[in-house]
Amino acid sequence: MEGIYFDNNATTRVDEAVVEAMLPYFTEQFGNPSSMHSFGNKVGLAIKKARMQVQELLGAEHDSEIIFTSCGTESDSTAILSALKAQPERKEIITTTVEHPAILTLCAYLEKEGYKVHYLQVDGKGRLNLDEYKKLLTDQVAVVSVMWANNETGTFFPVVEMAELAHAAGAMFHTDAVQAVGKVPLNLKDTKIDMLSVSGHKLHAPKGVGVLYLKRGVRFRPLLRGGHQERGRRAGTENTTSIVGLGKAAEMALEAMAFENTEVKRLRDKLEAGILAKVPSSFVTGNPDDRLPNTSNIAFEYIEGEAILLLLNKFGIAASSGSACTSGSLEPSHVMRAMGIPYTAAHGTVRFSLSRYSTEAEVDRVIAVVPEIIAQLRKLSPYWDGDKPKAEPDKAFAPTYA
Amino acid sequence: MWDYSDKVKEHFFEPRNAGPLEDANGVGDVGSISCGDALRLMLKVEPETDIILDAHFQTFGCGSAIASSSALTEMIKGKTLDEALKVSNQDIADYLDGLPPEKMHCSVMGREALQAAVANYRGEVWSDDHEEGALVCKCFAIDAVLIEDTIRANNLSSVQDVTNYTKAGGGCSSCHEGIEEILVKVMAERGDSFKPGTPAKEEAPPAGMTNLQRIKKIEAVLESVRPQLKRDGGDIELLDVDGKTIYVSMTGACAGCQMEALTLQGIQQKLMEELKEFIKIVPTKAGALSRASCQP
Ligand SMILES: Cc1ncc(COP(=O)(O)O)c(C=O)c1O
């Protein structure tokens, strides 16, 4: 498809080499890996290989620490519910206000079930206060779940350090690393991270496959019980094609790691600087000094994100927004609100997320188009006057709630 | 991405009457910045005739907010204030060949903006008292606040009750968990607790009434409200009776669907009093489903 795809934090294109690796497992190698005959055997070997490829990418000590799941969300749910089931005497969870709904919605549900959930706040740049965290780490905490990199802003959390602290307090540590895996070099064997979630479709593997990393020796209770697949830790016949694809994608991600952190980062920086230089009343959200190399989240004040996306789409540019309208909810992104970004800016946040397939020409094109689009929408905005915001914008336009 | 009609796209990509209106003499600012949609409507009204000579808008909001603002200005130009005030949010949505239910909910503020601008022109202050909550039922676009209020007002205690009174949950049923949560919360307020499996408030029809008698009674009630509807340029007709569901067709001008919903509620009340049983009244006509989307 033609067009500029700068929405790689939402999902990525499956690499051609990944598709090629997968194809035989739909037809010639269709066997069930659990079967005794040779149809199954070859498939079993392919899964073993994929497991090692993922192990390599994560820097895990053992390949048996890799459990294939159906998606990042399943990995998140499995990890947290397992920690609670395995330590029934501990009734508290620590997480952050800016997690993905895969964590937050589950936590809200667990609160109704009687668990106590502590939500760590973030500052204006999306950073945690570790002193606050330390105070909450008591022998009541079953699990800490903190994302490695935020999906909206790309901002990192110091999960390696936080895992050490959790470990010292006897709590399990889980991290949703769905956005980080493939973009950040990992060496899990040297950390105290007990569990980590991966989603295939964020690293050029197919949708509908994920991984839960489970450190050897960490007590575990499966979400799905049944057959002995994944050593009884995740029952259900394996999604063999996708697992093979994820293995290949993991191998390629490892090869591209340096590129992601140099060339992709350079393009992201160019895009961001180019837009900020030409668009007044706009700023980067999150922490620009400590974030994913591919993500730039820019707030365009006094206009609304869905409108920006529709106009970008007209120019063949795909991005995403934290506005309420794009999600059909009544509030803008919880991540922007947690950072204290005012409504007039939070609704106008746009996330550009690049990949190793993004090109310089695409970046140049977006830099050329965005300022026009923003100016066009600001012409319609009751907060805007000519080429700048009205003086005291909140007074110039203060609508009656309707 | 939302499934917008071509008309919406047209009004979004090339909005009509956008930007400030120099000599406006009626201005209405409405919306919710937290929700992400707000609108300034500016009118130039001819004082002798009350005719809207020109109308402009400025909107902070999404595609459908901008498109509906643009549509509104087109619809009201040349009308008198009283004529313009008859334009409902549903009329705006219809003009745009429909909007997704999620969008009806918070981005169509035309009617409110119009009321505010007219009040401003007349030297009055307009305030809106209807609050909106998170969308719960996507099939019929019913929000949490309406459901809460209805549960409170009628002492409801089952999902089926909520469906009978608000329609919420009557479609795909995926929102039943959400409705149960609201029931738990509101019932706790009145010191009650939600129990799944509680039967709906329906009562058996009084013995002794034959089907024919029942239908005759229904017809009599409808007949009694017709003169008033006709005065407002509308009408109602009985289409079918299926157990406790009474299907009617509403025709003609209804002063906005909000009024229609109120009218139907009133009729439902009358029917229940007459028949001494719980009944549900369902307006059927093309678009009946989407019309539910702007119940108060
Ligand atoms: C941080 C984070 N966690 C979890 C998920 C969910 O992953 P999946 O779509 O594979 O369930 C996503 C993807 O949207 C994500 O960005």
Image (cartoon, grey):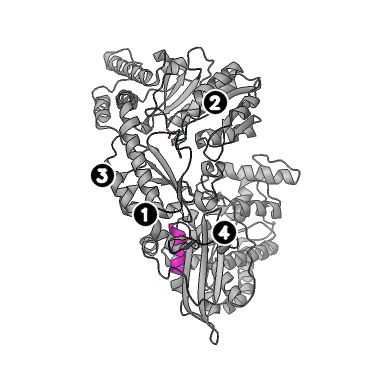
Which of the two discs, 2 and 3, labels the residue nearer the N terminus?
Answer: 2
Q: Specify the quadrant of the image occupied by residue A62.
A: top left
- Give the amino acid type for the residue marked by disc 4 in the picture: Asp
Q: Which chain carries label 2?
A: A
Same chain letter for marks 4 and 2: yes
Same chain letter for marks 1 and 2: yes
| Residue B68 on the magenta segment | yes
Instruction: Give the secondary structure at mark 3.
Output: helix
Compute the Cα span from label 3 to label 4.
39 Å
Q: Position of residue B144 (x, y in %)?
A: 60, 50
Q: Which chain carries label 3?
A: A
Which of the two discs, 4 and 2, labels the residue nearer the N terminus?
Answer: 2
Look at the numbered discs 4 and 2 and tell me whether their residues touch, using CB distance below 8 Å.
no
Boundaries of the magenta span: B60-72
Instruction: Give the secondary structure at mark 2.
Output: helix
Which residue is the site of mark 3? Answer: A361
Same chain letter for marks 1 and 4: yes
Number of other residues with Cα within 10 Å of mark 3, as a class: few under 14, some 14 to 19, many 20 or more: few
Same chain letter for marks 3 and 4: yes
Identify whether A196 is placed above or below A149. Answer: above
Which of the two discs, 1 and 4, labels the residue nearer the N terminus?
Answer: 1
Which residue is the site of mark 2? Answer: A80
Compute the Cα span from label 1 to label 4.
23 Å
Identify whether A289 is placed above or below B243. Answer: above
Quadrant the N terminus of chain A occupies: top left
Q: Residue A67 or A362: which is nearer the viewer?
A: A362
Which residue is the site of mark 4? Answer: A394
Which of the two discs, 3 and 1, labels the residue nearer the N terminus?
Answer: 3
